[in-house]
Image: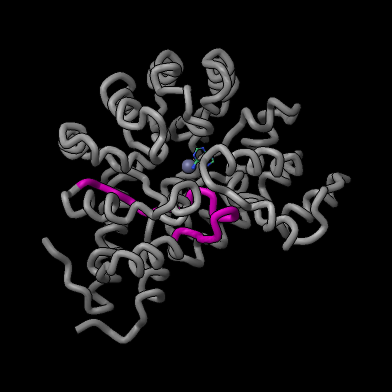
Amino acid sequence: MTDDVGLAEFALGLPKAELHLHLEGTLEPELKFELAARNGIELAEKTVAEVRATYDFTDLTSFLAVYYPAMGVLQTADDFHDLAWAYLQKAASQGVVHVEMFFDPQAHTSRGVPFENVIGGYRRAAVRAETELGVSAELILCFLRDFSAEHAMSTLMEALPYRRWIVGVGLDSDERDNPPSKFADVFARARAEGFLLTMHCDIDQPGSIEHIRQVLTEIEVDRIDHGTNIVESPELVALVKERGLGLTCCPVSNSFVTEQMKSDEIVGLMREGVAVTVNSDDPAYFGGYVGDNYVALAEHAGLSRADLVQLAINSFQASWLTPARRAAYVAQVADYAASHGVALEV
Ligand code: ADE
Ligand code: ZN
């Protein structure tokens, strides 16, 4: 017998990790106005409604065309701290106990903001989350794939003095004509420097399945961001299962940049035993934080509470925590499930 807590409440309270979250994608219009005023920046839009009216995305490219200009209000370390802190509080309120957060330093250094402002502000919020919210928070440095490999390499060099604050590196931005192999040397160097590796293989891109093949066989990533086009290749599905690699899926985001949440793919992979996880991607733009994504997927695909528990367990299994910490969080999920009368499949 399950208790009488509703599905949404159950999903929001479930202890979970978020593994696919762009800090710059958490910039809510209200904070954008506050930071613009703080930094003496005049914005074209004058109201929150006017800002939201610009969120008219049909694909990844049209999303990025709104996402990058908005970052102009982020300048000082305090600005970056305030952005991350606002996200971390929101995440904690939706059951997040561990998060591995992407940030895009090149989107800031390329407009003259020092790297140390970016990492310094984000790191301060991450440390604060641990002490004030009990949320463990790590940073993943993402390279912009529509910049050159040389620019990525010099960004990696700039990051080395801060390596103890960065758990891994990723690759994001516009995938068209920017395959993973373009960054093979940068990622090999990052691996040699001790970073874990992940890369975006966005949804329904030209060459999606070839890009997934490259991240698995040439780059040898430790995780894949999105990557649901893998369903087109049973061999590659078998490979991620064999390696126990996680896929960080973002159903609400998918429904903005394509016509669907890709729930059939996400749920199908989960049922096949792939470590798929549910995440929010850019919640300020797509209107759903991670708990909201669990609820949206559950409602759309008719998931049970046991399915949601499986997704939460996957989120820790696919994380870059130590095995002991993963096990401790999985035990926390099991306790939550048991206290809500949900039997776990073993
Ligand atoms: N940058 C921010 N969000 C992204 C996404 N979903 N895909 C690629 N680049 C991004
Ligand atoms: Zn993303």
Work out which quarter of the rendered image holds the C terminus and state it: bottom left
Does the magenta segment cover residue 114? no
- What residue is shown at x 30% (from left), y 19% (from top)? 218
Can residue 132 be seen at all in this image of the molecule? no
Residue range (magenta)? 274-290
Residue 206 against residue 43 in the figure, above or below: above
| In-image side of 89 versus 248 (left or right) | right
- What residue is shown at x 67% (from left), y 44% (from top)? 80
| In-image side of 234 versus 194 (left or right) | left
Residue 267 against residue 231 in the figure, above or below: below
Residue 181 against residue 340 in the figure, above or below: above
Identity of the residue furthest to the bottom in this view: 4
Which quarter of the figure has residue 292? bottom left
Q: Where is residue 31 in the image (x, y as percent from the top left)?
A: 72, 56
| In-image side of 13 versus 214 (left or right) | right
- What residue is shown at x 86% (from left), y 47% (from top)? 42
Q: Position of residue 205 (x, y in %)?
A: 41, 34
| In-image side of 247 versus 174 (left or right) | left
Does the magenta segment cover residue 281? yes
Q: Position of residue 22 (x, y in %)?
A: 53, 44
